[in-house]
Image (tube, rainbow, N blue to C red):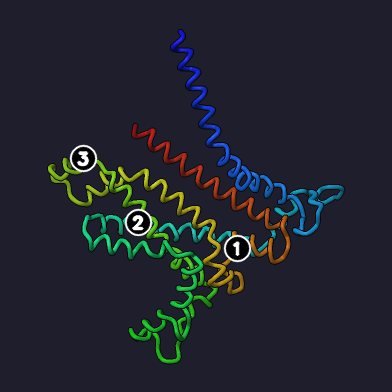
Amino acid sequence: MARVGSLSFMQKRDHKTAWRFLAPSLVLYGLYVVFPIFFSLYLSITQWDGLSTAVLPLCKNSEVSCLQNFIDLWNDEVFWMALRNNLVWLIFFSLSAPLGLALALFFHVKSQRASFYKSLFFMPMVFSLVVVGTIWSWFLQPEFGLVEFLLKGLGVLKDGEHFTLMASDKWATAGLIAAASWPHAAYCMVLYLAGLSNLQKNVIEAAEIEGVSRWQMLWHIILPMLRPATVIVVIVTMIGALRAFDLIAIMTAGGPANSSNVLALYMYQQTFENFRYGYGAAISVVLFAISLALILLYLRQTLKDETGRS
């Protein structure tokens, strides 16, 4: 009994020590993550301009609904355009994940040359998105841009014609997604390379002995083993598509005519340029709700699939 009691005492002491080490991180997490989320929820029912000291709900002593900001969002054409662009980002930005997988499968060899090329492909991920946006702005610039130079060299563009992709209200978002996919594909490649290094080699060797083809090996053996890496890649890709901001701010600032605007940038514009903190908070609440719903649905489906297999 004494041994059990002493063991219990040691476990309690270890738990207290663990909580002491976790306390600073939990305090910082609560201060800079949890508190802003709930404060944004409160701001979304106010009309705060960021300067006044009183931060009161819209329905305080008035006939205006507390949800007036969300009602205004419903009637805001720019908000719906930004939401549509976020959905476009979510669909086409996800193509960088299979591209990263293809690069990982191609470079999953141990050689100095492969290591060199992997470093080259990963280099864009090291750059800030501000730098990436500036580089792609040079690439896509009319008259002096690299893309226009190549198109003229191939004869696609004639003398006097210019490559004006980023000035088009239909194709500006496509240029932004292409620019953002450049570093993100490298990030997906690294995640998949980490997953490939943990594959069960005995299973692969057994499949090779059985004469399994490469496509069967990839579809029935390698991809199921890469499921944990795929879960991380998909979640990171969804978050990246929904929080796209700095690249768009650098390259188009949401233009032309808000055709490339997204929710994160529109939230910034309303909050810090128009001093509509309550309206900007309402946009952030919608963006947070969409992100949370998509991630939870994906995780639920993933867990259901894992349970079905087990």
- Between tags 1 and 2, which lies in front? 2
* The C terminus - image quarter: top left
Residue plotted at (70% across, 53% down): 70
Pointer 1 residue: 265
Looking at the image, which is closer to me, 260 or 8?
A: 8
- Of the two numbered discs 1 and 2 on the same chain, state the one appearing first in sequence: 2
The amino acid marked with disc number 3 is: Val
Per the model, the C-alpha gap separating discs 3 and 2 is 23 Å
Per the model, the C-alpha gap separating discs 3 and 1 is 47 Å
Pointer 2 residue: 189
The disc placed on residue 78 is: none
Pointer 3 residue: 203
The amino acid marked with disc number 2 is: Met
Q: Are marks 3 and 2 in contact (CB under 8 Å)?
A: no
The amino acid marked with disc number 1 is: Leu
Residue 84, position as x, y percentages in the image: 56, 60
Label 1 neighbourhood size at 10 Å, few (<14), some (14-19), many (20+)?
many
